[in-house]
Amino acid sequence: MQVSRRHFKLTALAGLLAGWWQPWFGSSSKALAAALRQAEGAAAGPLVGAVTPDTAAIWMYTPADAKIEVRCAPADDPANSLRAAIEPIPTDDLELPGQAWQAALLGLVPNTVYTYQVILDGQTAPEHAGSFRTAPLQGAPVNFRLGLTSCMKVEKPQDSWPLFLQQEPDLHLTLGDTVYADTTDPRVQWRHHLRYRQSPAFARVIRSVPTFALWDDHDFGPDNSDGTAKGKEHSLSGWKRVWRNPGAGAPDLPGAFYRYAWGDVEFFVVDGRYYRSPGKARDDASKTMLGDAQFAWLVAGLKESQAKFKVVASGSTLHHSMHDGWRVYTRARHQFFDAIKTHRIDGVVYLSGSLHNSLAWEHHESDRVGYPLVEVISSGIANSKRLGFATLDFDTTHSDPAMHVRIVNGSGKLRQEQTWRLSQLSHG
């Protein structure tokens, strides 16, 4: 949808007047509808998405007729500047007055800090500039920090985001409920994402820390939604365009799942919504969390991975949720644990969100795994009482690689801190 800049905000008004807004908001949610209408009429981003040893992806939303340019350079060599290749992201079906863009920075140097600037209509602005570190070569020993979050509402206090930035994470993984759209309609979902990305505290994070994402129920569909959700294919289409993740699904297998490596640590981000059986279904052999095909993809990847740590991440907890996690999917949970033991896969760690609380623990059924299965839950950075998050420091430069976990409350208090060595997380 191409509209002139002077109509950028006026066109947003049409969204409220059009009938499709009413089923989702109605007269009782006029304030929310107005906020989303305002969000679609303002710029959002930039967001640094997937980074590899030699590439980086940047996402931006602007007025439709804006002229956009992205330039970057090594932080220690600003004269060595390069220009990104930029393409518009198709959004006609979303009925937006603006335009989303994806910029590809190519030919970068591994494990190097870069600064970048988005230039709109020939103008620069501090809020359109950021930095990032490229990934180390796959398989290389690494020492890096992962910031882990989930569950964020723009109406809640955003004070933990500056604290999160103070931890200086090299990358950021957010595990769902990145917005609370509670629908599979991507037109509504996108407006929620635009609104949250215009929040100053969150905007500072996504423009300066490579951010990878996975959905959970509230950004996939309604509360506690599953694979029976009507319109889930539309939700997936919108999701793939609003984030710049390393991937989404596999050939002939749609979904939001993907894998990526940071040196010799590999992440397997699994989609616990698209194929999930209803939570209230009988907990028998037919009840699935990932679906058979995605589970086979996960096990094959874990078996072939040469990484020291193999990090499986999902929005759903293994045990702590009584109604919406692996706890009520016994066959699926045991199938996952048994596969690690049967194939003697060392160094598996599990990350999750959803709980509105943060902690690290060893699962009580770890005998099925063959070593302590550590789960790090990070939830509620902007939607919980404690407003906490987690950091994970991976250091594989020593003979016995280590993972150091910290749980940080929104007050800045260190609530939990623990280190696990690879030798502890191995079959021996």
Image: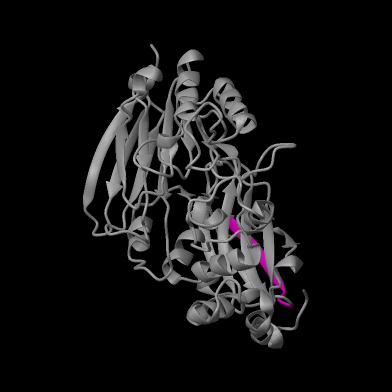
- Taking depth in this image into account, of 86 and 344 the one nearest to the observer is 344
- Taking depth in this image into account, of 405 and 108 the one nearest to the observer is 405
The magenta segment is 65-76
- Taking depth in this image into account, of 414 and 185 the one nearest to the observer is 185
Q: Is residue 72 magenta?
A: yes
Q: Residue at x 60, y 55 (%)?
A: 243
Q: Where is residue 332 drawn, in percent x and y?
A: 50, 29
Q: Is residue 230 left or right of residue 159?
A: right
In the picture as drawn, the residue positioned furthest to the front comes out as 282
Q: Residue at x 37, y 35 (%)?
A: 375
Residue 202 showing in the rendered view: yes
Locate residue 97: give its quadrant. Answer: bottom right
Q: Residue at x 64, y 56 (%)?
A: 235
Q: Is residue 68 above or below residue 336?
A: below
In the picture as drawn, the residue positioned furthest to the right comes out as 2
Q: Where is residue 316 drawn, in percent x and y?
A: 45, 42
Q: Is residue 188 above or below residue 303?
A: below
Q: Where is residue 162 drawn, in percent x and y?
A: 35, 62
Q: Residue at x 60, y 23 (%)?
A: 300
- Image quadrant holding the N terminus, namely bottom right
- Circle count: 0
- Image quadrant holding the C terminus, namely top left
Locate residue 64: give its quadrant. Answer: bottom right
Locate residue 346: give its quadrant. Answer: top left
Q: Is residue 369 magenta?
A: no
Residue 80 showing in the rendered view: no
The image's colouring method is: one colour
Q: Is residue 361 left or right of residue 13?
A: left
Q: Where is residue 352 drawn, in percent x and y?
A: 42, 42
